[in-house]
Image (cartoon, helix red, strand yellow):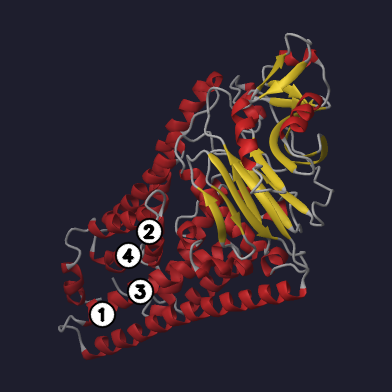
Amino acid sequence: MNKLEYDKIKSYGQKWFILPVVSAILVIATLPPIKIWWLCFICLVPIYLFTRISDTYPWKRTALGGFLFGIIFTAFILSLTVLQFHWVEETYLFTELIRISSLFILIFIGIFASFQILLLRLLKSQNAVAHIFYAAGCWTFSEWCTHKMMFSIEYSIIGYPAHNTTFASLAQYGGVYMTIFAIALINMSIGSILYYLIKRSNRSCSTEVHKLDEKNIKRSIAVLFFCIAGALVLHELTIIKIEKEKSTNEKSSIDVSLIQDQDKTESPFGEEKTDTQTGETYFSFPRLQKLVLEAQKDQIKPQIIIYPFAPWNGAITEKKNKNLFNKKVIATDFETFSNWTKLYIKKDNIFVTWNTTYRDTLFYNEIHFWKNGVLIGYSQKKLLFPFLDYTPMFSQKLGMYTTPIDSSPGSSTLETLLYDRSIGTLVCSEVTHPIQTTNAADKDLIFAIGSEALFSSGGAGEFNLGNTVYRAIENNTPIIRANRLGPSAIVDNNGNIQAELAFGKEGVLHGTVEVPHKSDTTPFERNGQDIFITILLISTFALYYKNRKPLDF
């Protein structure tokens, strides 16, 4: 291509690093703690423009621009998560290794971003629609790959801020990646319009080139229009469907209180004590006792109270066997804790707790349901996270243990109906996985209970609140997110946050959640998100084959 055609564009990019840096800063601004969510619609525009003018640079500079973009926003995310990581004192070596790994993650994502930019440079097409589609598909696929490589932890870069928008409703059809693709399309369309407007202003170009630029501007505007219009139509169809289900479905409102306790060090679990007069053993947790009483004030009257314990600070065991207490993590037994609930939980209220439980010589990560001093049901964590729920065998052979005890994957689910509604649970990190892979599928109401206490900042908790919104939309199911350190929230089946208690706040969040009977499955529940990714890949390759002639360099 005639290099003169890019003179005007190059005048905007003499300092080649500005566009990647600006794009990375805009991405960061959409994330916690800044959270200017609407920037997600334009945060990729500068890096897209960089890819379009990158053929005026040497290949190495193109790659370096992508690397710079990748490491800047990744460094920020790592500062909120991996660099804030801390674990039990005995595993200080493991903690340091996790923090050191941030350097390798940073370099890897930077290289990954470099290849992404180089790929887009190779895929340039004279058809604006094709290039927009390539760029949006490439970004979506890169987020999907990162999700898989990071043990399925879902910290979506443009997906997180989009949970505040109507585009989040697309998740009911293709999961969070359909939302990501739509947001990416908007970014790339805006970038394409700007690119051709700048390029068209170069009067030295031939008439034929000007006509092609005009045509591509119209194509880019058309993509932008159809993307926004299509998303809004699907959103409205989703709302209509949900409202229709509500009108024909029996409604049930459940009042809940979620307790947040900010103590990380002194008494995160409570302890057993002995009465000096009677010699009887009893469970004591003054901080929780105060908060539980606050949650049950006469003017509030919740039906369900939820408190996530600190599982690694104390496990509960089935049998009252003091010989088990030589295991450091064992803190109390069911009978002793049951007596405590009789004292502090009002009659007929349901008290929901998150615990590590010792059953039949194995440890499980469980959610318990207590009523009138009786454990009426429990649900177990199915999807365990390596190094945090258990130490993998290869690490054990190296002599590096990362957990006080190893949890086992559980299959038990809550069979009891609460207030005529079926209840499912997502235990801690399970909120980052599709619900169909957990024990919570096909339930009327889901409790997502956990804590990101292993991170000093609230960034991970904010991301998982976004994940909670997507899980609610994907399954058309209300979710109660109870987080010991926050944020805790009540999310309806359309993904709207009805009530929220922020990270770092101690106290009680009260709210009412409407729980219709689950009568139908969503397209996402039937097909999953991998189907959408597969269709996207096939479409991208088909479009590339049709428009495979690249621009001349």
Work out how far the residue at label 3 is from the one at label 1, CA to CA, in angstroms: 11 Å
What is the secondary structure assignment of the residue under circle 4?
Answer: helix
Residue 297 sits in which quadrant? top right
Q: Position of residue 37 (x, y in %)?
A: 41, 60
Would residue 150 appear left or right of 313 to someone viewing this image?
A: left
Mark 4–mark 1 Cα distance, whole angstroms, equals 16 Å
> Label 4: few (<14), some or many (≥20) within 10 Å?
many
Lower position in the chain sequence, tag 4 or tag 1: 4
Residue nearest the observer in this picture, 240 or 214? 240
Q: Quadrant of residue 527?
A: bottom right
Dot 3 lies on which element?
Answer: helix
Front tag of 2 and 4: 2
Q: Point out residue 129 in the picture as x, y percentages from the top left corner.
A: 42, 79
Q: Secondary structure at mark 2?
A: loop
Mark in front: 4 vs 1: 1
Q: Mark 2 to mark 4: distance in Å?
A: 25 Å
Q: Quadrant of residue 366?
A: top right
Residue that label 2 marks: 36
Label 2 neighbour load within 10 Å: few <14, some 14-19, many 20+: some
Closer mark to the observer between disc 4 and disc 3? 3
Task: Kindly identify the amino acid type of the residue bearing the numbered disc 1.
Answer: Leu
**Residue contact between numbered discs 3 and 1, judged by CB atoms under 8 Å:** no
Q: Which residue is mark 4?
A: 51
- Quadrant assignment for the C terminus: bottom left
